[in-house]
Amino acid sequence: MEQHPKSSPSPSPAQRAADASAEMDASGVKVTVSAVRARAGVSMEAARLGVEQWRTQSRQPEIPMPDTVQRIFASAWAAAVTDADARYQSDRDAARELVAAATAEAEETGKLVDTEAARAETETKRATAAEEEVARLKGQLAEQAARHQGERRLAAETLEAEQARTQEAREELAEARGALAVLQEQAALYWSKKDTPKSGDTQN
């Protein structure tokens, strides 16, 4: 029965990083953790471990170790790399959750801004309508003054009341615009902070 040779297991991320370090050094390229990470396509922690392994091997001659020691070392090394990869994945997931939360908060802020903008528009329409009503009443007052001198006092009181309501509407409009301006500043500050790259993002 024909036996096929068993394929050797693929090297660990740290071993790939160590091999990449040796290749870069042989090519005269400066060996750094970031460069090794990009060349080997591994996590930052695996790249760091690989560079340390390469530096250790390049400083000391290779000493044969018993199979038992090699297995223990390989197991411990694999466990360390697995733990480093798990921590890297956990940190990346946590960062994604923070981004999702920030996005949700930005959407909520946008909804508040839209609500205040709609309110300001409504108040503007109310103020405009009130001013038009005042103008209409002034015209009626002029006509009534010519026909009914005795009704001037009543018309003047009506005009005064409408002017008071107009002033109240203007004040409400000013408050609404002020609140809208504050929310717009908060939204602009938030997006400005959000668009600024974080130091953690540049490393990953």
Image: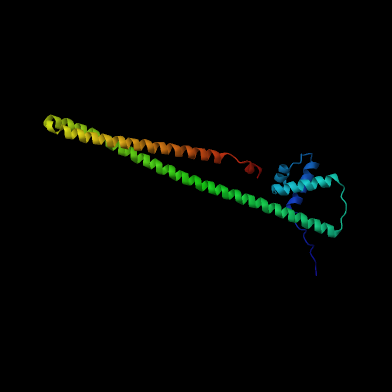
Q: Is residue 86 visible?
A: yes
Location of the N terminus (image quadrant): bottom right
Relative to 143, 202 lies left or right: right
**Residue 94: horizontal and vertical position, in percent?**
60, 50
Above or below, 4 relative to 53: below
Colour setup of the view: rainbow
**Residue 59: horizontal and vertical position, in percent?**
85, 44
Location of the C terminus (image quadrant): top right
Relative to 47, 152 lies left or right: left
Which residue is at a point 21% across and 36% down the rendered structure image? Answer: 158
- Residue at the extreme bottom of the image, as rendered: 1
Which residue is at a point 48% across and 46% down the rendered structure image? Answer: 107
**Residue 166: horizontal and vertical position, in percent?**
29, 35
**Residue 161: horizontal and vertical position, in percent?**
24, 36
Above or below, 8 relative to 56: below
Residue 31 found in image quarter: top right
Q: Is residue 133 visible?
A: no
Relative to 127, 159 lies left or right: left
